[in-house]
Image (spheres, helix red, strand yellow):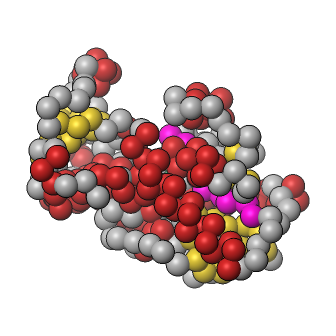
Amino acid sequence: MLSDITSFHFKGYDFFIKRDELIHPLLSGNKYRKFYTLIQTPADTYNTIISYGGSQSNAMLAIAALCHQKGWAFAYICKPLPQHLKAKPTGNLKAALDLNMQLIEASDYDTKVSSLKNSGKTLLIPQGGADPLAQAGIMQLGNEITTWQATQNIDKLNIVTPSGTGTTAFYLAQTLPNCQIITTALVGDNTYLKQQMQQLGNIPNNLTLLESSKKYRFAKPYPEFLQTYEELKQNGVEFDLIYAPLMWQTLLDNMQHIQGTILYVHSGGLTGNATMLARYNLSL
Ligand SMILES: *Cc1c(COP(=O)(O)O)cnc(C)c1O
C-alpha cells in the first residue's frame, strides 16, 4: 500500500479518503500514480523529457521532481509568461525551475507543441500525463483499493476523483469494473472530457460524469471554492484549491443518487495552494 485510507465525516455524511497526497511532497497524488512507470524506469533509458502545458501545472512540477531524481534533462514548453511571473516565479513554477527545469516560452505554442515527438533517448509526455503510460500506476492504485475493499467487506463501492484530462478516472474505471467511478470535469465541460477520455479507449460503463451546477473556468479563484477548501480543512484534510472544491460540491449535490460506500481518492496538488491562496489575498 503506497497510501492509507482514512475515514472522513463531512456535512453529515461518512466518506473514506485514499490519502495519495501523502505519498511524496512533490511527486504526489495522481501524478505519482500516472508517472509510476517512469519512476520505475532505469535512469539510463532516457536522458531528456519534454512536456508542455500551464506554467503552474501540478504535472509540470511532478515531472521536474522525477527528472531531478533520475538525472534527466527536462524541457517544458508553455505560452509566454505574464510579466509578474517572469520577473518573480512563484509556486509550482519556482519549485520546478529550482529543480533545473528548462522553461521554453513559445509565442507559437500550438505549432510548437504539435511538432514535438519522441526521438532517441528523448521522451515526450503529453500535457497532464494523459498517456497510456499512466495505466500501470493507476492499476496499482486500483489494486490497493480492491484489497482494502475486501478487508472491509464493502459490497457496493463508489470511487470519486476529480478530472482534468480524465486519465486517472478512465484507468480507475477500467481497473475496477465492479465499482462505480464518479468524476466531474474541471477543464471544459463533460463533452470535452469525454473526447479526452476517448483518446485512451472506449469509455467504461462504470464511469459516471457528474454535471456541476454552475460553469467554472479552470484554475480561477471562486469564493465558494475557498469556502469548501476551508471547510474540508477544518474537518482534518487539506485538499487542493483547483480540482477538489468543485468535485466535493458536485458530489454533495448528488448524494441522494449514490448508494453504497464512497471512497474519495485524494488527487494531491497541495504544492499549488500557496499561489492560489495568494490570489484570494490569503497565505497558507
Ligand atoms: C492533475 C490533477 C488532476 C487531474 O487528473 P487527470 O488524470 O488529468 O484527470 C486532479 N487533481 C489534481 C490535484 C491534479 O493535480
Residue in front for this viewpoint, 76 or 89: 76
Residue 139 on the magenta segment: no
* Percent coordinates x, y for residue 243 in the rendering: 54, 54
Whether residue 123 is situated above or below residue 134 in the rendered picture: above
Any part of residue 69 in sight: yes
Q: Main secondary structure of the magenta part?
A: loop
Asked if residue 11 shows in the view, the reply is no
Q: Is residue 159 magenta?
A: yes
In this rendering, the answer to whether 32 lies above or below 152 is: above
Identified at 80% across, 64% down, the residue is 156
How far across and how far down the image is residue 193, in percent? 59, 35
The magenta region covers 157-166
Q: Quadrant of residue 115?
A: top left
Q: Position of residue 269 (x, y in %)?
A: 43, 60
Residue drawn at x 65%, y 54% as measured from the top left: 176
- Give how far across and how far down residue 197 sits, in percent: 56, 35
Say which of 155 and 239 sits in front. 155
